[in-house]
Image (spheres, coloured by chain):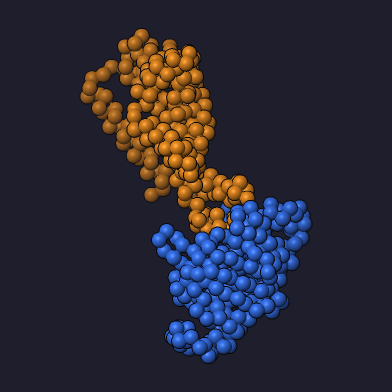
Chain colours: A blue, B orange
Amino acid sequence: MNLVVEGLVQRFGDATVLDGLDLRTGDIRALVLVGPSGGGKTTLLRILAGLDLPVAGSVAFDGVALPREETGLRAYRRRVGTVFQSWNLFPHLSALENLLLPLVHVHGLSRAAALARVRGPLERFRLAAEAGKRPAQLSGGQKQRIAILRALVVDPQRLFLDEPTSALDPEMTAEVLEMIGELSREGTRFVLVTHEMAFARRVADEVAFVAEGKVLAHGPATTMFDACPVPRVRDFFSRILP
Amino acid sequence: MPRALAHTIVVAVLIGLLLLAFRSSGYEFRWEGVWESREMFLRGWLVTIGMSLAALVLSALVGLLAAMGLASRYRLVEALARVYVELVRGTPLLVQLLVGFYVVANAVGLENRYVVGVLVLALFSGAYMAEIFRAGLASIPAGQRDAARAIGLTPWQALRLVILPQAVRLVLPPVAGQLVSLVKDSSLLSVIAVSEFTLAAQQVNSLTYSTLECYLPLAAGYLLLTLPLSALARHLERRFAWEAGS
């Protein structure tokens, strides 16, 4: 995927969260957004995922601009998948029904076809035994892996993952990162916001450092982590990398 | 101590105290006149049940509309809903019934006092329902709407498949509680001469002059309705306690 962002501005009340953000990637599979909290990563991801409209600026994936009105954006959201920090599964439905809902009600599959579609992925990620449980009965790691499957089973063009492990303990973090890593190796395209720098280095084709509402630096993972020419970014990494 | 035993002890002590109080007052019970009027009590009791149920169904509709009005983007609609809720919750039902029957119903030519009674009761209860529904809708986390939009649901689908199923579970217990209030509040319908349970007791009393013999069964008759409803409300609360951890 090739992403071009130009002059993106987002405000919430008086606060300017994105301040004329520009980003131009190569033809890549995985883009990772890193940077300090409150720097605008999540706000940027929500716009890329078609959840929020920016105040100004434009976004284009592979040369196709994102729609600027809700109906067009909804059609766009149906072609991509989004995973949230706090998973946001539907608590009144079982894990299985959480997966079936978008297939049946958004993509028009019959229940039987939808069941056939989700069986393989559930088994593959060792979640088949959990399918009948409500989200409240699942561990955090299981919830997030179901949430990733919910985004994935509709066969999206790309995934947007917003700090998918920030609400998890280390063991569950490992199990979720392992799943994302596996999807990455298979060629799933995604944009990921994360604080897991070691993981970012492993999966990212490009890393963008977002702070103060702008992209302060971006490039291949190795350049970014080991030899970034921008002092502000080097400082950040030197403080958090071992 | 088991809960049932604790309840029994408390109730037994209360009844004992009550009996002592009656004895020291020197009141002589005469049940014959009241017993002869038992059919009147029963008819009144059934009218109370019927009108409460009718008012409940209507007030749920009114409450849902008003709750949507309270959350409306349109200032005028929001103001209308807000004024309705505050006006109704801020004035006595007694006044609403009298004004509703002798002024409003009279002006529009509505003569059936049962219909007027149910309408006023529904409008009264609807204002409380509106706040229950508003709170229920507001307590669905924003992440649920995000997730519904992210998978591409339309706003109507999001409401039907995601928001309402969760909100209904949240509001059922307080709605059952509201029904308890509604049953008791319906006793005020006697002021516009609806022959419900309380009016029946008043009429029997004026015939037999045996006040307590009329009003004690009246209290028992209401408890017979409200206690199971309270139990239902508590049961629903426990049953839907799963939530959390989405």
Can see residue B60? no
**Residue ID at (41%, 33%):** B84
In percent of width and height, residue A27 lies at: 68, 78
**Residue ID at (38%, 24%):** B96
In percent of width and height, residue B189 lies at: 41, 21
Most distant residue in the top direction:
B207
**Residue ID at (53%, 67%):** A8
Q: Is residue A177 above or below residue B134?
A: below
Q: Nearer the viewer, residue A184 or B113?
A: A184
Most distant residue in the bottom direction:
A227
Q: Nearer the viewer, residue B103 or B201?
A: B103
* Left or right of B140 on screen, residue B96: left
In percent of width and height, residue B185 lies at: 40, 27
* Left or right of B122 on screen, residue A47: right
Q: Is residue B103 above or below residue B227?
A: above
Label count reads 0
Which image quadrant: the C terminus of chain B?
bottom right
Can see residue B58? yes
